[in-house]
Amino acid sequence: MDVIVLVAKGAIGGAFVVLFSALGEVVRPRGLAGITSGAPSVAVASLAVTVVATGVAAATDLARGMIAGAIGLVVWCLVGTEAVKRFGALKGSIATTGLWLVTAFSLWAVFLR
């Protein structure tokens, strides 16, 4: 059963990537096309397969985890631009990646655990 779910997630995720990529070709300006790239489509596919395979409760937990990671990524982006300017690309990226991990895991510990 686990192999079937894994294959289904991969197949549906791939189909969503193609669909979102096609949508990205239509979106103007091109800078917004990244919003419709692979990660959102794989997340939607993963949630859909999880709902079918294990139920809504498991998908709810996954969705909350995705939200925590997304909030951490927003913090990473907001702080990262300034950190790279101040400390250079390598040190700024490492520092903000640590901040992303702290933010995402803190949200996970408080709201999801």
Image (spheres, grey):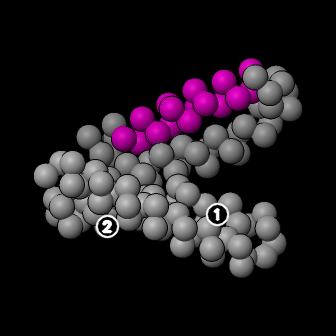
Residue 72 location in percent, x, y? 54, 43
Q: Amino acid at mark 2?
A: Ala
In this rendering, is residue 12 above or below 89? below
Q: Residue at x 52, y 63 (%)?
A: 17
The reply to whether residue 59 is in sight is no
Residue 6 location in percent, x, y? 28, 51
The boundaries of the magenta stretch are: 91-108
Read off the residue under disc 2: 48
Looking at the rendering, which quadrant does residue 73 occupy? top right
Most foreground residue, 53 or 94:
53
What is the chief secondary structure element of the magenta stretch?
helix
Residue 53 location in percent, x, y? 18, 61
Most foreground residue, 82 or 16:
16
Looking at the rendering, which quadrant does residue 18 occupy? bottom right
Q: Secondary structure at mark 2?
A: helix
Question: On residue 35, which mark appears?
Answer: 1
Q: Secondary structure at mark 1?
A: helix
Q: CA distance from mark 2 to mark 1?
A: 20 Å
Residue 97 highlighted magenta (yes or no)? yes
Left or right: residue 8 versus residue 92 is: left
Question: On residue 56, which mark appears?
Answer: none
Q: Residue at x 33, y 62 (%)?
A: 47
Q: Amino acid at mark 1?
A: Ile
First along the sequence among labels 2 and 1? 1
